[in-house]
Image (cartoon, helix red, strand yellow):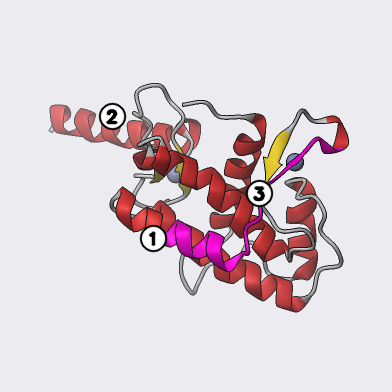
Amino acid sequence: MLITHDTRCALDTVVDLVNTAPEDDTTPDGLPDVPALQVFVREHQVSEVGVLTEADLAAVRRIRSRFAAVFAAPDPRVAAGLINELIAAAGTTPRLTDHDGYDWHVHYFAPGASVADHLAADCGMALAFFVVAGEQERLRRCEAPDCRYAFVDLSRNRSRRYCDSRTCGNRLHVAAYRARRKEAAG
Ligand SMILES: [Zn+2]
Ligand SMILES: [Zn+2]
C-alpha cells in the first residue's frame, strides 16, 4: 500500500500519542499537563494549532484512549466502527493544501478545529486507509509481555511483533536464549 509522507507523519503522531498513556495507575502520564501537550504538538508539527488549554488536554486524552482501542481492535469491523466515531465527532473536512512548501496533500481536520479534533480527523483518516487497504492487522501492540506499546507494522510481510526490535525484541531474544541454555545445562 502507498503511504504518503503526510500519512506517515500522522501514523507517527498517533502511535506516539497512544504510547503517552499510562499503562496503569502506578505509571506516569506522558501528557501530564498543558506544557507537555505543547511540546507534543510542536515535535509532531501539528499545524494550525492555537493557544492550548486544560480543556484541550482533557480532550486529547479522551481521543487518545479511543485511538488505543483502535490498536487493540480484534478485526477490521471493530476498528472501522471506532474510526468512524472518531472522524465523525471531529467534523472531518477534507481539503487540498500545499502549505509550507509541501506538495499537494489532503488535510482532514476542519478549519479552526481544536487540537483534539485535528488529531482525531487526520490520524483517524490515516488509520482508515489501513482498513480500506485490508491492512488493519498492521495496527498492533507490542507482544513483549511487559510492554504493550502501540506500533504500525510497515514490514513487507507483516512480521513485526515488537514495538522496537532493538529493545523489546532483543530483550526477549536474550531471555529465551538464557532459558534454553539453562535447560540444556540442567
Ligand atoms: Zn499538511
Ligand atoms: Zn515493546
Q: Which residue shows up at 68% across the image and 55% down it? A: 109
Dot 3: element? loop
Circle nearer the N terminus (2, 1): 1
At a point 14% along the width and 27% down the height, the residue shown is 184
Q: Which of the marked residues, 1 or 3, is nearer the chain's N terminus?
A: 1
Q: Where is residue 75 in the image (x, y as percent from the top left)?
A: 29, 50
Dot 2 falls on a residue whose secondary structure is helix
Residue 76 located within the stretch drawn in magenta: no
Spatial CA distance of label 2 from label 3 is 50 Å
Q: What stretch is highlighted in magenta?
A: 82-99
Q: Quadrant of residue 138?
A: top left
- Mark 1 — residue? 81
For the residues marked 1 and 3, what is the alpha-carbon distance in whole angstroms?
Answer: 20 Å
**If the picture is divided into quarters, which one holds ligand 1?**
top right
Q: Where does label 3 land, which residue?
A: 94
Residue at image coords 15%, 33%: 183
Drawn side of residue 73 relative to residue 109, left or right: left
Three-letter amino acid code at the position of disc 3:
Pro
Image coordinates of residue 97 in percent, x first then y, are: 78, 39
Determine which residue is flagged by label 2. Answer: 177
